[in-house]
Image: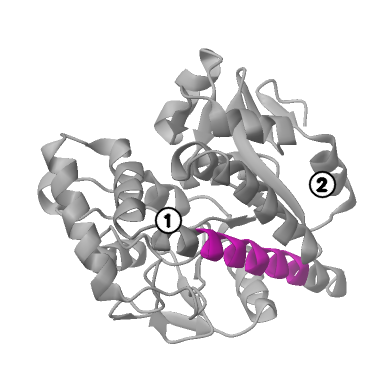
Amino acid sequence: MNHEFLKIQPEIEQALFEGKPIVALESTIISHGMPWPKNATTALSVEAAVRAEGAVPATIAIRDGKLQIGLSKDDIAFLGQEKNVWKVSIRDMPYVVSQKLTGATTVAATIRIASMVGLNIFATGGIGGVHRGAASTMDISADLTEMSTTNVAVVSAGVKSILDIGLTLEYLETKGIPVVTYGQDAFPSFYSQQSGFLSPLRLDTPTEIAKMLLAKWKMYLNGSVLIANPLASEFSIDPEFIEGHIQNALVEAEKNNITGKNVTPFLLKEIAQKSKGESLQANIALIHANASLAAKIAVAMRNLESLNG
């Protein structure tokens, strides 16, 4: 708790001491996922969704050389308006911390920081993965390699539909990362309940998922579990409709020489504009749903641990 690079919000520190269920949340959605003030209001409402299910939210970011676990309303407002916020993955952490810069953490960086203090449930929108055209670009998200070693479960709406979903599922299998979809056999594709791929595993209750996580880690099988939570049908977008916007956005990215970690925020912004905000509405809905499910799993895990002494 006294690590020189950690700054833990008092509420989180107390929750850790008391063994309360806690859900880690990323901060790239605040700085790189949505416009102001929608980004800040969404971040606060996602935290409220976690609290509504009986867990404590711990949004994670980097500020003034500190890995911040838990953000104040002022912190969230700052991240939502500041222009020069780094999008921080694992490789960027030493530089951003040592230079005392401001950074919003990706899935990979967030779960690494969460694991430092023993948090093991994390909610996000969608994970990174194998990018389209990766056979020539070798563009594979650090989210996947980090998930193969870090004992933090990731609740998301599947894999971002801008990626190569099939290759991402293959890569997850290669890395030994279990993929379980909540409540349906089909693997979701972020904006849609359908991706064209079957889920490797299916579980139907938060308690079943909690039992799986505990079994995995008690057997010293290190690494994450990807818990895919399909978007509710009223927010789900037709896969063919969204695919058309993705293809157009990919063309625009190539025209503008958008590469590396700038690709995803560029594509999401383009898709939101071209879909007249429909994708943004779906994005907000799925983040809330994932936070809620993550909190239910965290509560179920604490209950199971209490029963087992």
The N terminus appears in which quarter of the rendering? Answer: top right
For residue 127, which numbered disc appears in the image?
A: 1
Image marks 1 and 2: residues in contact by CB distance under 8 Å: no
The quarter of the picture where residue 64 lies is: top right
Residue 89 seen in the current view: yes
Left or right of 167: which side holds 108?
A: right
What is the three-letter code of the residue carrying label 1? Ile
- Circle 2 — which element? helix
The C terminus appears in which quarter of the rendering? Answer: bottom right
Q: Residue at x 61, y 50 (%)?
A: 42
Would you name the residue on which mark 2 appears? 16
Residue 72 seen in the current view: no
Left or right of 261: which side holds 283?
A: right
Look at the picture and state if 306 lies above or below 138.
Answer: below
Q: Residues within 10 Å of mark 1 (few under 14, many from 20)?
A: many
Q: Residue at x 61, y 68 (%)?
A: 213
Q: Residue at x 17, y 55 (%)?
A: 248
The magenta-colored residue range is: 284-301
**Residue 180 in the image: x percent, y percent?**
48, 75
Marked residue nearer the N-terminal end (1 or 2)? 2
Residue 236 part of the magenta segment: no
Q: Which sits in the foreground, 201 or 79? A: 79
Q: Which sits in the foreground, 42 or 161? A: 42
Look at the picture and state if 294 lies above or below 132.
Answer: below
What is the three-letter code of the residue carrying label 2? Leu
**Residue 25 in the image: x percent, y percent?**
61, 49
**Residue 47 in the image: x percent, y percent?**
70, 52
